[in-house]
């Protein structure tokens, strides 16, 4: 009964655990859906929502890959940190099998960026190359253009100018095929700047002229700023300071947020062209906003050196060293912090993995235990049912035997009564005697069969068959003795009276032994049941046989005497 009660409780616990897990998974998926809808219009909010998903590593492979892709796309609009390499590698495994060509190219781009951030240049280039091949093969030109742009950035770290120009040119071509005019303009601007670095100004200006014409159709202030900034840099490299000044001023007017770089470039022009007063005036305005800017203090050094004021030049030179040291210390701290952050993340990942494995092991153990409990309960139920059926069949069989014995006893009594009343007809008398003999034999067989099918007979047979070394205690308890005597009196109702008529001095212990002996057990089995040695059994039988009378056949055993004389 207790096992049957544990079964529904275990199932209920399992259902509650599954429900809690489902609620957490549902909440994560709801956040993913909301972030995906919000990403095109509010990338910052979408990025915060994605960062706030609890334990994203516990997501399934499909949803985890989706989370990684949304995080990667959000970094194009925000300054969020790139995910760790192992996260992108897990996402790539699933997307390579189940994702679209665009997703396979995108995940290669994001994984390459992660490698590049960790300065794994060779792995980054290999990943970019494979992703670019996939993108171009499936005509995903926009993603292919971005891959070429990042490959050009990677070549700049390796100081490979020819490859840089090649990739910017390829990126511009791919953006043209994709219809992404804004990115095409940026790629052409970068390409023109690279040509200006090698003094190919005519080619650089020709590219810029084409980029400027495309930008004019977009009417985007950010694009116009980048065009003006590129023109200013090109003319600065060409030492055409008048045109460079014009475009620097135009860039400053278009984007005040990024005006510091252009203002510094303008100061460089003033210094190079000998207009020191304008340079100092412009620097003085900027230094009020950012007194710790390294480039501004370095410009002061150049200005005061050109004026011959070496004392002030030395002062600003020392300030530059202090700023440089401060920047170096901050960068080192940032690098240490980043390393610690990655280490802690990996430790958390390992701990989460360990906990996940432990939870999986517990879940497997729980399921196996629950399955064993269910199977055991089912087996126990059918065993009980089978046992009850067997007991019921046994009971019906015994009842049928009892009923047949009663009928046989009635028939035998009637036949004997008829034999007493019919004495004249010899033939009829002979038939009745034969019938009485047949009924008597059949009655004895039924009684014997009824005894051998009784519960007490099978119980004692089972007990006597078990070997128990060094056992000196009787296995037959008072309860078993009483059950045996009651069963024997039910099957052989005249056994007790006929035995005591023959031998009134029979003791209670001897009477009980006679009840045990009629079962037909071996002497060794009887010795086991009574907890005595076998030789005591032979002495007990001999003593009871002597008490029953000297006129009994000596060659017959006690069992034969009891069964053939006293039981009937």
Image (spheres, rainbow, N blue to C red):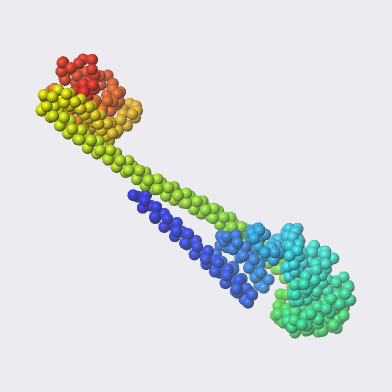
The foreground one among 335 and 146 is 146
The residue sitting at 19% across, 35% down in the picture is: 406
The foreground one among 362 and 114 is 362
Where, quadrant-wise, is the C terminus in this rendering? top left
Image quadrant of residue 93? Answer: bottom right
Residue 376 in the image: state x and y as whole percent: 41, 46
Residue 83 in the image: state x and y as whole percent: 64, 64
Tell me if I can see residue 245 in this picture: yes
Tell me if I can see residue 147 in this picture: no
Image quadrant of residue 148? Answer: bottom right
Against 383, residue 539 (above or below) is above
Residue 149 in the image: state x and y as whole percent: 76, 68
Q: Is 14 left or right of 158, judged from the image as shown?
A: left
The residue sitting at 46% across, 51% down in the picture is: 366
Tally the numbered discs.
0
Q: Is 190 left or right of 378, judged from the image as shown?
A: right
Residue 523 in the image: state x and y as whole percent: 28, 22
The residue sitting at 16% across, 15% down in the picture is: 550
The foreground one among 139 and 184 is 139
The foreground one among 252 and 532 is 532
Against 477, residue 220 (above or below) is below
Image quadrant of residue 421? Answer: top left
Against 34, residue 515 (above or below) is above
């Amino acid at each position: 009964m207790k096992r049957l009660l544990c079964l529904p409780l275990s199932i209920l616990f399992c259902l509650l655990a599954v429900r809690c897990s489902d609620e957490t998974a549902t909440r994560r998926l709801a956040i993913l859906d909301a972030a995906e809808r919000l990403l095109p219009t509010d990338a910052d909010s979408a990025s915060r929502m994605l960062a706030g998903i609890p334990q994203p590593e516990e997501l399934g492979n499909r949803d985890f890959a989706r989370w990684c892709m949304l995080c990667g796309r959000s970094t194009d609009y925000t300054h969020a940190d790139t995910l760790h390499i192992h996260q992108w590698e897990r996402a790539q495994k699933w997307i390579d099998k189940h994702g679209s060509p665009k997703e396979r190219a995108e995940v290669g781009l994001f994984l390459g960026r992660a490698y590049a951030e960790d300065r794994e240049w060779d792995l980054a280039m290999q990943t970019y190359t494979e992703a670019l091949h996939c993108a171009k093969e499936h005509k995903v030109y926009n993603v292919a253009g971005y891959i070429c742009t990042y490959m050009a950035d990677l070549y700049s770290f390796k100081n490979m100018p020819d490859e840089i120009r090649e990739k910017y040119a390829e990126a511009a071509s791919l953006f043209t095929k994709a219809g992404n005019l804004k990115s095409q303009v940026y790629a052409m601007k970068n390409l023109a700047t690279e040509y200006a670095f090698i003094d190919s100004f005519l080619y650089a200006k020709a590219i810029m002229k084409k980029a400027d014409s495309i930008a004019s159709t977009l009417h985007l202030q950010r694009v116009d700023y980048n065009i003006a900034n590129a023109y200013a840099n090109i003319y600065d490299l060409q030492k055409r300071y008048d045109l460079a000044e014009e475009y620097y001023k135009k860039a400053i007017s278009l984007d005040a947020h990024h005006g510091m770089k252009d203002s510094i470039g303008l100061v460089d022009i003033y210094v190079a062209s000998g207009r020191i007063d304008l340079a100092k005036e412009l620097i003085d305005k900027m230094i009020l906003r950012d007194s710790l800017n390294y480039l501004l203090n370095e410009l002061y050094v150049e200005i005061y050196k050109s004026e011959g004021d070496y004392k002030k030049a030395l002062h600003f030179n020392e300030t530059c060293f202090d700023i440089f040291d401060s920047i170096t210390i901050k960068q080192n701290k940032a690098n240490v912090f980043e390393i610690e952050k990655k280490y802690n993340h990996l430790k958390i990942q390992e701990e989460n993995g360990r906990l996940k494995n432990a939870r999986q092991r517990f879940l497997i153990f729980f399921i196996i235990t629950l399955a064993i409990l269910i199977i055991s309960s089912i087996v126990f139920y059918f065993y009980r049912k089978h046992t009850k059926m067997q007991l019921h069949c046994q009971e019906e069989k015994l009842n049928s035997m009892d009923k047949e014995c009663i009928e046989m006893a009635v028939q035998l009594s009637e036949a004997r009564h008829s034999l007493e009343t019919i004495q004249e007809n010899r033939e009829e008398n002979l038939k009745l005697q034969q019938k009485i003999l047949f009924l008597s034999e059949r009655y004895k067989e039924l009684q014997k069969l009824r005894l051998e099918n009784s519960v007490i007979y099978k119980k004692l047979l089972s007990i006597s068959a078990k070997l128990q070394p060094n056992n000196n205690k009787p296995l037959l308890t008072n309860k078993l003795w009483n059950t045996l005597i009651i069963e024997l009196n039910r099957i052989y109702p005249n056994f007790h009276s006929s035995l005591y008529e023959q031998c009134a001095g029979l003791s209670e212990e001897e009477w009980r032994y006679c009840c045990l002996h009629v079962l037909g057990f071996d002497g060794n089995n009887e010795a086991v049941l009574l907890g005595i040695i076998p030789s005591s059994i032979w002495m007990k039988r001999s003593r009871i046989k002597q008490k029953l009378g000297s006129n009994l056949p000596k060659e017959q055993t006690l069992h034969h005497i009891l069964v053939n004389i006293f039981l009937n």
